[in-house]
Image (cartoon, helix red, strand yellow):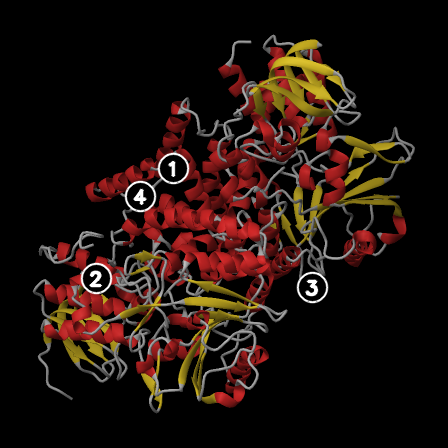
Amino acid sequence: MKSYDVIVIGAGHNGLIVASKLAASGRRVLLLEAGDTYGGMARSENLFEGFLAPELASNAGGISKDVVQDLGLNKYDLLFNEDGIKTVGLNIENESVIFGSNFGKSIEGIGKDEFKRWKELREKFFNQSHLFQSLASQIPVGSNHKTFRSKANLFFTAAKLRLQGKEQFQELLRMITMCIADLVEEELETSSLKGLISFDSTLGIKLGPRSPTSYLGLLYKLSQIKASYQEKSLSINGGVTSFINALFKSAEENGVDFIFKGKVSSLIISDSVATGVKLENGVEYSAKTIVSSISPVNTFLDLVGAQNLETDLTRRIRALRYSGTTSKLNIILEEIPKLHNSQNLGANYRYVYAPSLDSVESNFNSLKYNELPSDPNFEMYFSQISSESSLNGAVMASICIQNTPYSLKGDWKNSKEVLMNKVISTIQKWAPEFKKGILFTSLLLPHETEKKYCVAGGHWHHSELQIDSLYSLRPTFGVSDYSTPIDGLFICGAGTHPGGNLFGLSGLNAAKRILRESTK
Amino acid sequence: MQSVEKNFDVIVIGSGHNGLVNACYLQKAGLNVLVLEKNDWIGGAAVSRELHPGILYSNCSYVCSLFRPEIMRDLELPKHGLQIVAIEGGTVFTRDGDYLASFRNYHAKKRELERFSVKDSESYLRYSRDILKQCRFIQPLLMRTAPDPASFKFRDLSEMLYILRKVNDLTASELADTVRFWTMSISDFLDEYFENDVIKASLAVSGIIGTALGPMSPGTAYVLLHHYMGEVDGSIGAWGYARGGMGAISKALTSSFRAMGGTLLNNSEVEKVDIRGARVKGVILKNGDEYLAKNVVSNADVKRTFLKLTDPEHLPPNFIKKVNNFKIRGSSGKVNIALDSMPNFPVISENNPCLKGDIHFTDSIERMERAYDDWKMGTWSRDPFLDMMIPTLTDPTMAPPGKHFMSCFVQYCPPKVGGQNWTKENKDAFGETVIQQIADYSPGFKDKILHMEVRTPKELEEEVGLTEGNIFQGELTFDQLLFNRPIPGYAQYRSPIKGLYMCGSSTHPGGGVMGAPGRNAAVEILKDLNLPDTDIRDAYEVL
């Protein structure tokens, strides 16, 4: 049996970060990946006639600065350009609202008074997101006794917030569990602006804008903006692909061994100590430290197995809510379509169709009952396909559809087509030439994501990113500080604090935690 | 009009149960207290009224559990005629013609659950144990003024310390469970224990009653607690009928208040609180009368108190904005029915004790949530959730033999229909929706109706004075609980105006016929007046 210091399971971005960082400390690291390439849910797939592009992830805006600096990713051709991505709120009846980069620092399409109110509200939002931002890079207070440092950090975070001022602190305590609908309705009037904010607060989580605590979704997003290069309106050249490539190069350079198509079937555990892994093809590897970057459901129920866990933890893991709520539609077009008012659709824009708060809420209503939304909300990015490909000049529209049920009432067979057509005909309303230019479409539903990317429920964040599963409760009580009751087994995926999207802090925190725990 | 003196130590606006509790405690402490009530009956939303000859209606609140036993004993309410009778059981009728009964006897209840799911009947023990733990944690907090976490005053810091110590008493896993419980939706919470839809629906009821939230909204698990943390005769979570209808509570409180020498005036609607130079002078009535007092306590909700009864010039603009932003959402209505005879439910025998409790027809969480979706879109639920009671089965004093009073609490019912005021047609259609649902399960029901009173949020607002008809005087979401209730920085029953206090359900710990806000406000007022509060005993000291 081949032996390593560390085995990392899963070559998603968090897995790559942990592997690279631990290898840099001098450990011999093996990274095992079930798929045939690295990147996890951000990996590139052959979409159409040899054209490779990320199938699921469409935006690398939220990558943490800490991760880039800590791993020195700049030296692997990770370049930034200065035109931050603007968001256009598509609204047919009224003029569209255009959100400047950095979450609406400037806005086109609303009145002066409304902008003044928005400016104040935005500042409040950003101030409050400081709480999340400072917690994001901390290792949560865990269940074991070595958490004095974490507790002290928590205390200082609270004290810092209080020192921002009494009024602000009171507002934070009032607002933090509120629904985003109440907050925007207290201040704003523009329907499409409210729709846009509601959409951003609830994308990827199973809440509607009128559900209490949906404001947390926005705080999470804003804290990511603050922790990433978006705050300076920088975006990564080459987006997701160049970030994932840089991570891979970093891991490779630090001496990580990779095995692709090496799906782990179980962990080798004796007396609650993990000593190695067993692959599906029967090969075994041993290591003192095993880090799982796959979803906590897969880690604990499939790899560890209930027989090795206390019933309390098994019960908590089973109670996780991990059904995905978003689907991904990729469309390849001959060229960038023109808008009906003959403006160009640009590559530096994100288009959001969420015309009003009620539209987002009624979409969510359908999701609750596992039904298709009648008028689905979505966000869309365009990217030019590079000249090296045979599709020279073509563009890819990468569309994320909100509120797609994991298990549909009835059958997906015909509904898949229906969902796709609904989205396309909505786009068609702005871009009359859109349909004509379509070369290829593919829609990936949550249950298909589950299968293809080996993620239970096909959930972006591995499990719901809601108030009852944050910080010390993420993924659940007892395993929140990246360690597990199985000695030698750690977790580092999106299911751990601070959570999903292409953020990277779960991996970085876990790596720090492991380095703190053991010398080698 | 009877002649009364015009000078008092304290004036309480509104004779709701909290106003009366507050007045009793202050009178007991030696102050001269006047209670002013706009209606010609007493009790706000805790009333019994004879709306049909011989039949008493609990036409607003209809059951009792939360009313704190400490208050009952402090104010000697049993001596003044208050008697609470525990409710026997409850039942959910299902669409497939079956029913799920619940009984107070644990074994009977378990057997009944087993009929639907053996696994769930086993989980039920774990579930009730976990809920009870949460009740134990919160109960002592009900009878204490919430500390202001943003303040550095000694009393706030020491009260925070008290709470932190209580939190520290929990084990890490209990703490984790508590945090989750306070923030989860009742639907997700029940999913962790149960698999059967009917069982889940029957337990989710307490998570939505009175709130403008559906069972799938985060925070509703806490609302459940709000209906569980009460007790009858020391049995936590039990519910009871006040003998003689809910008005019996107001009656006993009034009797206790008058016995101590307090003054209560009906038909005296307050127009304005008289404020001179940033402090209270008294109140001016609609009829022009003025009563003087250095302290005025408002039992009205926070919006009515500060947006209607107080001139805005006396309040900081920031405070007014926050009052405006306080969420009071009418979400429920009531249909009160006098019946010629006991309605017939074919699947169940007339003498089954489960009919003595709450009767529901909503047999899945999805139906509840869809009822809520209708409300969100601005209309009453097409398939409403009903919480029905026939208190006359337990309390024969409310109706002549054979006749019955039936109380139907209806969720969800908006304060306005599609943004427009309620019309008579709307109201009739709403009543018809409710009656039809009952008739679907009880053949011949419509023929038994002697008299019927339909109450939408509009009537509740006009008659009782509850803004938007919200029975809790404000949503019970976390942004409006504890130190946030009603407004951050003003959670200790005081207002920006010296001498003006709040004691209604808009304040901590919130709604339900509990009496705790009235009692806690009395403690704070006595503190300001430098009077001893020895007659107000701490939670559980009397038990």
Spatial separation of the CA atoms under disc 4 and disc 1: 12 Å
Q: Where does the image place residue A49, in percent across and percent down from the top left? A: 91, 35
Say if mark 1 contacts mark 3, CB within 8 Å.
no
Labels 3 and 4 positioned on one and the same chain: no
Q: Chain of mark 1?
A: A
Up the image or down, B92 lies above or below B217; here it is: below
From the viewer's perspective, tell me whether residue A440 is left or right of residue B377: right
Spatial separation of the CA atoms under disc 2 and disc 1: 39 Å
Q: Nearer the viewer, mark 3 or mark 4?
A: 4
Q: Where does the image place residue B18, in percent across and percent down from the top left? A: 26, 66
Say if mark 3 contacts mark 4, CB within 8 Å.
no
> Looking at the image, which residue is at 83% across and 48% down?
A337
Sequence-wise, which precedes: disc 2 or disc 4? 2
Question: Which residue does the numbered mark 1 point to in the structure image?
Answer: A161
Identify which residue, B167 or B147, lies in the foreground: B167
Q: Secondary structure at mark 2?
A: helix
Q: Residues within 10 Å of mark 1 (few under 14, many from 20)?
A: some
